[in-house]
């Protein structure tokens, strides 16, 4: 159909350009505008909430018609952004999350509130029966994460988690390549590393405290544990971690509570079947760099993503595949069009929203399910516990101590 560009050629970057104002809608083809087909409500207008608002408009097949946030400056920021995007529809300012979810005009609710509030916000909205996108991590405690998992899998509508790093150009390309077992043979080891600046400012600085965020390895690193699960396809069994708060926010306190977020950590993960994984986090650098190394019995895949906010802030990705002594050597530079890369998280947020539309259309997608979100949270929480207690954590023991039957959370995608 005309509005479905999945297989057709479009020049989306020209759609919003004033350069083509003299061309009537009737004469537009490559730069035709799409009328939004879905209405979203946004709960939480902080950094990620505003990114969702902006990317919804950029993707074009939906629009945010209303927002809720108890913090008035955040609502004002959402209003300014909405107005700047040229929408011809006023933005509804709801007086509660329930009012947003129960608006008959709303087709999907996006929850982008502080981590510790996710389940508190989601639980009363379930009665609306509306599709939901919940930002990562799904919760900050195992109790809340399990409660959300059970509710999500009983929910009659779409329920997805915002784990969009799986759509970054580097990782999307790596996942595609690794789907072919001939690329590196049977997977044996996996390593991911992230080097980046400290956590950004947030309203109330909730992301500087374990109590508000769930801890660094939950708040930030659930993205990478999700990626590791997608690459290995195997359940994690044992987690051992070491980390510290070496530099960042050691002089920051709120209401008598000292900031306690880790700024560096190393995590070792044993997976079923003998696979070994490792993850390194370092938040003491001025630029952004991520590394991926996947080794099989017939070769190795190596990838790197780099962006320098003090330079041109462009994402530069490389991916190399080496296959044995006489095998192929592959070097590629995965990327998205610049207008997509600049939209948020290296273009991953745009691709999340595009898949969200496909899911609402009833098409199959690889959006993160609640179960995938639960396991990404679980490994992060296990790593936090390992550091706190100075000992490895057995995933089975962690679930048992929480009174969770392992059969109820069996590793896998489960129904979206």
Image: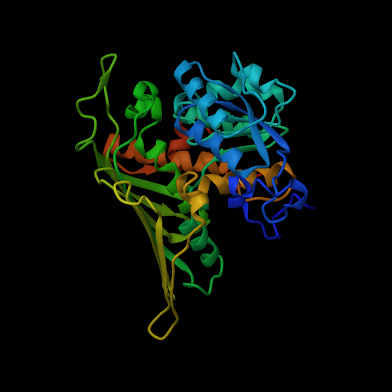
Q: Please state which of residues 387 and 51 is positioned toward the viewer in this rendering.
A: 51
Residue depicted at 48% across the width and 35% down the height = 137
* Residue 81 higher or lower than 75, as above or below: below
* Residue 323 higher or lower than 351, as above or below: below
Q: Please state which of residues 55 and 14 is positioned toward the viewer in this rendering.
A: 14
In the rendered image, is residue 246 in sight?
A: yes
**Quadrant position of the C terminus in the picture:** top right
In the rendered image, is residue 412 in sight?
A: no
Residue depicted at 38% across the width and 27% down the height = 202
- Colouring style: rainbow
Q: Position of residue 148 (x, y in %)?
A: 57, 30
Name, please, the residue furthest toward the front.
22
Residue depicted at 24% across the width and 30% down the height = 249
Residue depicted at 36% across the width and 50% down the height = 313
Name, please, the residue furthest toward the bottom.
326
Q: Please state which of residues 43 and 27 is positioned toward the viewer in this rendering.
A: 27
For residue 264, which quarter of the picture?
Answer: top left
Q: Position of residue 5 (x, y in %)?
A: 70, 54
Q: Position of residue 214 (x, y in %)?
A: 40, 31
Query: How many marks overall?
Result: 0
Seen in the image, is 202 located left or right of residue 152? left
For residue 119, which quarter of the picture?
Answer: top right
Q: Position of residue 4 (x, y in %)?
A: 73, 52
């Amino acid at each position: 159909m005309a509005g479905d560009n999945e297989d057709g050629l479009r020049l989306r970057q020209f759609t919003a350009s004033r350069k083509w104002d003299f061309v009537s809608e009737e004469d537009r083809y490559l730069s035709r505008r799409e009328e939004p087909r879905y209405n979203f409500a946004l709960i939480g207008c902080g950094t990620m909430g505003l990114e969702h608002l902006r990317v919804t408009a950029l993707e074009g097949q939906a629009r945010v018609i209303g927002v809720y946030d108890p913090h008035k400056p955040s609502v004002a920021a959402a209003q300014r952004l909405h107005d700047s995007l040229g929408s011809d529809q006023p933005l509804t300012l709801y007086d509660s999350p329930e009012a947003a979810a129960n608006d008959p005009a709303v087709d999907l609710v996006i929850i982008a509130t502080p981590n510790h509030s996710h389940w508190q916000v989601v639980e009363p909205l379930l009665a609306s029966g509306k599709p939901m996108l919940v930002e990562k991590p799904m919760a900050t405690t195992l109790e809340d994460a399990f409660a959300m998992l059970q509710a999500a899998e009983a929910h009659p509508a779409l329920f997805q988690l915002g784990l969009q790093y799986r759509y970054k150009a580097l990782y999307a390309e790596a996942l595609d390549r690794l789907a072919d077992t001939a690329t590196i043979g049977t997977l044996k080891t996996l390593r991911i590393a992230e080097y980046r600046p400290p956590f950004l400012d947030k309203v109330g600085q909730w992301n500087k405290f374990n109590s508000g965020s769930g801890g660094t390895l939950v708040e930030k690193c659930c993205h990478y544990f999700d990626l590791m699960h997608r690459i290995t396809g195997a359940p994690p069994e044992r987690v051992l971690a070491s980390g510290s708060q070496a530099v960042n926010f050691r002089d920051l306190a709120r209401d008598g509570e000292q900031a306690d977020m880790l700024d560096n950590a190393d995590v070792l993960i044993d997976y079923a079947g003998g696979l070994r994984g490792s993850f390194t986090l370092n938040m003491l650098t001025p630029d952004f760099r991520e590394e991926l190394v996947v080794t099989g019995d017939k070769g190795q895949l190596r990838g790197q993503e780099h962006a320098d906010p003090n330079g041109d802030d462009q994402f530069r990705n490389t991916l190399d595949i080496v296959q044995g002594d006489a095998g192929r050597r592959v070097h590629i530079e995965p990327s998205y069009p610049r207008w997509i890369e600049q939209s948020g998280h290296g273009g991953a947020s745009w691709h999340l929203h595009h898949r969200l539309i496909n899911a609402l259309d009833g098409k199959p997608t690889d959006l993160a399910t609640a179960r995938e979100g639960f396991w990404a949270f679980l490994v992060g929480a296990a790593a936090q516990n390992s550091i706190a207690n100075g000992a490895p954590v057995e995933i089975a023991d962690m679930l048992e101590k929480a009174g969770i039957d392992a059969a109820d959370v069996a590793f896998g995608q489960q129904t979206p």
